[in-house]
Amino acid sequence: MLAGLHGMVRHGFALGPLGNLKAAWHVLRGSQAWAPFPDNDPEAARHHMARFFRMVNRAGRLRVDPRLAAELEVAWWQAHRALQHDARVSENDLLAAMVRFYRYLYRSDRADVRRAAALRVHAMALSDAWVAAGCHLDDPTLATERLALVASYAALREAGDRNEMSS
C-alpha cells in the first residue's frame, strides 16, 4: 500500500523524494488508523491526514486548513464505512460528503465537482462489490473500477481547470 500511496503523492503533489515518502507514510498511517472495524481511531486518522495536508501546503501544492481538510477527508471515509454497514445510509450521503471534500480541497463549485464525486462513489461501490465477491484478480470489476477512477480524476482536473480560468 505504501508503494501505491507513494506513487499517488509523487504524481499528484511532487514533493521531492523524501517529501513524497513522508507524505505517503502519513496517508498510510491515517488509513491504518481508520481501517479496523468497528474499533478504528478517527482522531489518529485525522492527525495523520492533517500532517499530510500540512506537507502539501508547505510545498505550495494546496492552500487549505490542514485540520479542516483532514476532517472533511475522514468524514467521507466515515460516510463510506456507514454505507457499507448501515442500511439507513445511502450513496447520496457518501456523495454529499465527497462533494464537500472536493469543493473545499479544489475550491470549486458544487456542480463542477459533483461529476467527479459521483464517479468516485461509483468506483467505491465497485471496489466494495469486488471485495464482497472474494477479491479475485481476474474479476472484470477491477477494470471497470479503474475506468471509473480515471474518469473521476479527469473530472476533478476539469473542475480545477475551470476554477483557475474563472479566477
Image (tube, grey):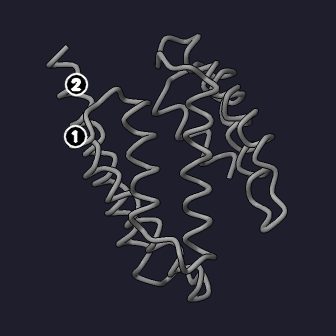
Answer with left or right where residue 155 lies relative to residue 99. left
Q: Position of residue 71 (x, y in %)?
A: 61, 37
Q: Quadrant of residue 47?
A: top right
Q: At 34% from the left edge and 26% from the top edge, which residue is drawn?
A: 107
Residue placed at 62% from the left, 56% from the top? 78
Q: How many marks?
A: 2
Q: Amino acid at mark 1?
A: Asp
Q: Quadrant of residue 112?
A: top left
Percent position of residue 61, x then y: 47, 18
Q: Mark 2 touching mark 1, by CB under 8 A?
A: yes
Q: Which residue is mark 1?
A: 112
Q: Based on the displayed image, in which of its 4 quarters is residue 16 positioned? A: top right
Compare residues 147 and 64 and report the one nearer the observer. 64
Quick one: label 2, few (<14), some, or many (20+) residues within 10 Å? some
The picture places residue 56, in percent across and down from the top left corner, at: 56, 20
What amino acid is at disc 2? Answer: Asn
Give the distance between the C-alpha atoms of the residues marked 2 and 1, in whole angstroms: 9 Å
The spot of residue 28 in percent (x, y) is 72, 44
The residue lying toward the viewer, choosing from 74 and 9, is 74
Query: Quick one: label 2 or label 1, which is nearer the N terminus?
Result: 1
Q: Nearer the viewer, residue 82 or 60?
A: 82
Instruction: Give the labeled residue for mark 2.
Output: 163
Between 133 and 99, the residue placed more toward the observer is: 99
- Residue found at the far front of this picture: 88
Q: Secondary structure at mark 2?
A: helix
